[in-house]
Each structure stands twice: as C-alpha cells, then as structure tokens.
Amino acid sequence: MKDIFFCPEESNFYSNCLETFVLKNCSHSDSIVEFGSGDGSPMINSLLKTKFDAVIHGFELNTSAWKLANSKIDEYNLAHKYKIYNSCLFNSSKPQAEYLVANPPYLPASDPDIYMPLLFGGVDGATVTNNLLSLGYKNVLLLVSSFSNPISTIKRAEEKNYFVQKFMVLPLRFGYYSSEPKVKKHIESLRKKKMAFCSTNYYFLAGVLFKKCQESAINLSNELVKVMTSL
C-alpha cells in the first residue's frame, strides 16, 4: 500500500531495538507508549519474541496503517497487550508509562509536500524527534537519522536531562522516501551546513535509548555523535 510506510530493513532494525533495549528489560508493571505505530509490525514481531506482559499504548495518525495494525493485533491475539489509537500523542492527554518509544518521522524538506507527508520531520528532519524528548518520559527509545540534524537531538536530550544509555547503529542505503529529489536536494543543503551527515548513497540510523539523567550515569552521547557524524 503506497499510503503506508514500507521499509523492511528499517522496521526490522526498530523491532530489534525494541526487543533489546526495552521489552527484555521491562517488569510486569511497566507500560509503554508508542508514537507512530505504523502497521504495528515492529512491535508485534518484538512481542512474539519476548515475555513482555504489560500494556503498550500506540498512537498512529495514518488511518490505513491503524486499521492494518489492528487487524494484525487481532490475528496474533495481542489485543490485551497492544492497543493502538487513531490519534496523535501530542494532542492526547499524555498516558503514564515508563517508556516512550518511536521510529519518528525524520525526513527533512522545505515543507510537508513530499511522497508521504506523515514522514515529514520538519525543515531539519529533527523537529518531531526533539519534541518527543520534551514529553518528560523517564526512558525514551528513538530512531535517530544521521541526515536529520542529530547533533540538535543530542543537545535537546541534554537540555531535558537525558543521557544516552545505549545505542546501536545501522548503515542504510537511501530508499524510496529519502531519495525523492526534493528531499535529497534538501539533505544536501543541510549537509553543507553540517546539519546532515551522509555519503551519496548511505546514511546511519541509530536506535538510541535515552534515560533521565543521574549524576553517576555513564553518558554515551559523545560516542554516538562521533559515529553519526563519521560519514
């Protein structure tokens, strides 16, 4: 379906981050809020591989993706664990949870008039990502793109008293959405301003677990910056 985000490599990476950084470390009382659940596949795949037994509240604006996600949830009998609402988290009364997780929209462009407008991440690509770090959740798992002003995301995290607890990085080839001429041209303009870091064909996507800061915590933000700006 052209109106539903489709990138198996990225979705599998997100699923791996969910499983490794969140679901395997949750207690039975820990709930999760997910921004932009899409068709639900990454979370469903992770749930099927773990013993997570609490509740995930997902939010998805794309009605087609929301309907598909709920059909998959019913297919795998996960309705007691995974509930997705056809609404925006930013416009909802904020659910209480130990974790906020998201593969947020991160495509940079001059405006949202792109192949899939819901993938627009703001002029620098980091707007939605950075806003999620302002919601105050104790633990936040985000996918962060190297061509979407990642340094601004690290700075926003520090401003909000988060440290980088864990991260993993995947090199990705520019795909259907990021190769749209309007998007690619804008990324090149950001690259010249040292706000995007990528080669002609590849960029890095990092799965980053941010945690509200503790004085004794080890902060991996410098290591993350080095990796994300190395292309």
Image: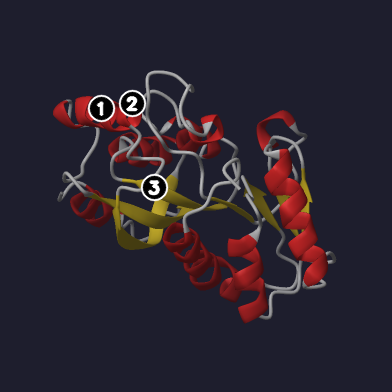
Residue 222 in the image: x percent, y percent? 24, 51
Image vertical order of residue 28 relative to residue 115, above or below: below
Name which of mark 2 and mark 3 comes first in the sequence.
3
For label 2, the residue is 182
Image vertical order of residue 30 relative to residue 108, above or below: below
- Colour setup of the view: secondary structure
Say whether marks 3 and 1 touch (CB < 8 Å): no
Between tags 2 and 3, which lies in front? 2
Q: What residue is drawn where x is 72% and y is 55%?
A: 69
Q: Amino acid at mark 2?
A: Lys
For label 1, the residue is 185
CA separation in Å, label 2 and label 3: 21 Å
Name which of mark 3 and mark 1 comes first in the sequence.
3
**How many circles with numbers are drawn on the protein?**
3
Image vertical order of residue 162 relative to residue 80, above or below: above
At label 3, counting other C-alpha atoms closer than 10 Å, the crowd grade (few under 14, some 14-19, many 20 or more) is: many
Q: What residue is drawn where x is 62% and y is 49%?
A: 38
On the rendered structure, is 204 left or right of 47?
Answer: left
Between tags 3 and 1, which lies in front? 1
CA separation in Å, label 2 and label 1: 5 Å
For label 3, the residue is 144
Say whether marks 2 and 3 touch (CB < 8 Å): no
Res. 69 mark = none
Say whether marks 2 and 1 touch (CB < 8 Å): yes
Q: Amino acid at mark 1?
A: Lys
Farthest residue, direction top: 110
